[in-house]
Image (tube, grey):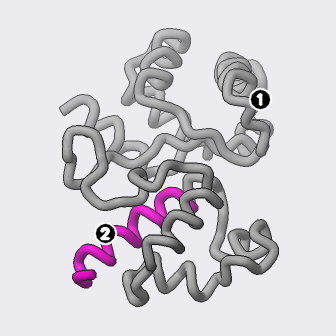
Amino acid sequence: MSSEYAKQLGAKLRAIRTQQGLSLHGVEEKSQGRWKAVVVGSYERGDRAVTVQRLAELADFYGVPVQELLPGSTPGGAAEPPPKLVLDLERLAHVPSEKAGPLQRYAATIQSQRGDYNGKVLSIRQDDLRTLAVIYDQSPSVLTEQLISWGVLGADARRAVQHEEA
């Protein structure tokens, strides 16, 4: 495996892990020691080659198809996908409901539809952000700035919105 391919594979592994809100030690804990933090970290950095068998087992652990972990499997062959839009649900709970009520209800609906009740973070799509912008009667970029100011979205969400508007 070329070192560039290993790094791309590692980036995919890291993206899936962080999307699920797991630290490297969280992976070790959740897997009850099956996946050591140091080993997963070395896969993610591209320092250690991962066998097809181990990759399939990691995909199963993360609950994703193996092809989602392979470099070049992004839709349309995009070199680098825009950052994910991830709502911090713990911070959202501290925003006054007169401001965040519509977002709280929208997030609760998505959680219900997905059966995703981790309560910490929630990934949303660009379409969700556009819908929320209509609800808040703001443009997606203005709403993004508002959510960042509340601490509900990370600053990297700006890149996702700029990517969408380009």
Q: Earlier in the sequence, mark 2 or mark 1?
A: 2
Residue interval drawn in magenta: 1-17
Q: Is residue 116 left or right of residue 57?
A: right
Residue with the mark numbered 1: 96
Q: Residues within 10 Å of mark 2 (few under 14, many from 20)?
A: some
Give the number of callouts: 2
State left or right for residue 165 relative to residue 146. Answer: left
Left or right: 135, with 100 as reference point: left
Q: Majority secondary structure of the magenta segment?
A: helix
Q: Which residue is located at x 42 percent, y 88 percent?
A: 48
Q: Position of residue 36 (x, y in %)?
A: 67, 83
Q: 74 or 104: which is nearer to us?
A: 74
Q: What is the x, y in percent for residue 156?
A: 41, 51
- Give the position of the C terminus as an image quadrant: top left
Q: Residue at x 63, y 39 (%)?
A: 122
Q: Is residue 62 left or right of residue 44?
A: right
For label 2, the SS is: helix
User: Could you tell me the amino acid type at mark 1?
Assistant: Pro
Distance from the alpha carbon under mark 2 to that under mark 1? 41 Å
User: Which residue is under mark 2?
Assistant: 8
Instruction: Determine if the magenta segment contains residue 3.
Output: yes
The reply to whether the magenta stretch includes residue 65 is: no
